[in-house]
Image (cartoon, grey):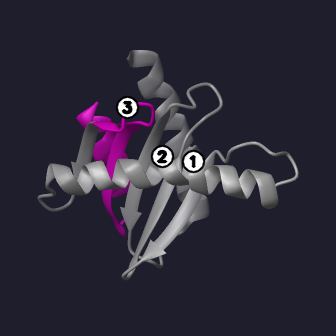
Amino acid sequence: MREKLDSLRTRFTGCSIVAFADLSTGLVFAASTREKTDQERLDALCHEARDVLCGPVAKTMAETGFPSRQEPMHAVSFDAGRLSLFVRTLSQPQEALCFVCDPNTSVTEMIGPGADLLTQLGREA
């Protein structure tokens, strides 16, 4: 699993973290990081993913901003010179890939490969 996360992270030069997270428990199963990253940082990333994909932020957006009234399958946030991308799939809505990247990283290029890897990892679990 770690090798697949490493491969995806290094595919995007601006990407510093890719984490495979369980949104229902708030746990990170595995992560690939460019630099040493403490568990607290990974946990915070997972909690942010939960908030924007299926928590209070997602529910507010579904009620006010999206005609389908469904929770999003991906979300982006910007903070302190970094971009965070969170991706999940309909087949495994309780799991997500969390990316931390430079702000100029192309989010649209990352969503498809992220969803594909998430589907693979879900089949292996």
Front in this rendered view, residue 6 or 102: 102
Q: CA distance from mark 1 to mark 3?
A: 14 Å
Q: CA distance from mark 3 to mark 2?
A: 9 Å
Question: What is the quadrant of the C terminus in the image?
Answer: top left
Residue beneath the point at 51% across and 31% down: 94
Q: Give the label on residue 95, or none.
A: none
Q: Give the label on residue 50, or none.
A: 2
Boundaries of the magenta span: 1-28
Q: CA distance from mark 1 to mark 2?
A: 5 Å
Question: What is the quadrant of the N terminus in the image?
Answer: top left
Residue 121, image x, y percentages: 42, 26
Kind of residue sitting beneath label 2: Arg
Regarding mark 1 in the picture, which secondary structure is present there? helix
Callouts 1 and 2 close, C-beta under 8 Å: yes
Which image quadrant for residue 38? bottom left
Residue ID for mark 1: 53
Residue beneath the point at 44% across and 44% down: 97
Which callout, 3 or 2, points at the residue further toward the start of the chain? 3
Residue 40, image x, y percentages: 19, 53
Regarding mark 2 in the picture, which secondary structure is present there? helix
Residue 96 horizontal side relative to residue 61, left or right? left
Query: In the image, is residue 53 above or below residue 14?
Result: above
Residue ID for mark 3: 25
Regarding mark 3 in the picture, which secondary structure is present there? loop
Front in this rendered view, residue 10 or 104: 104
11 within the magenta span: yes
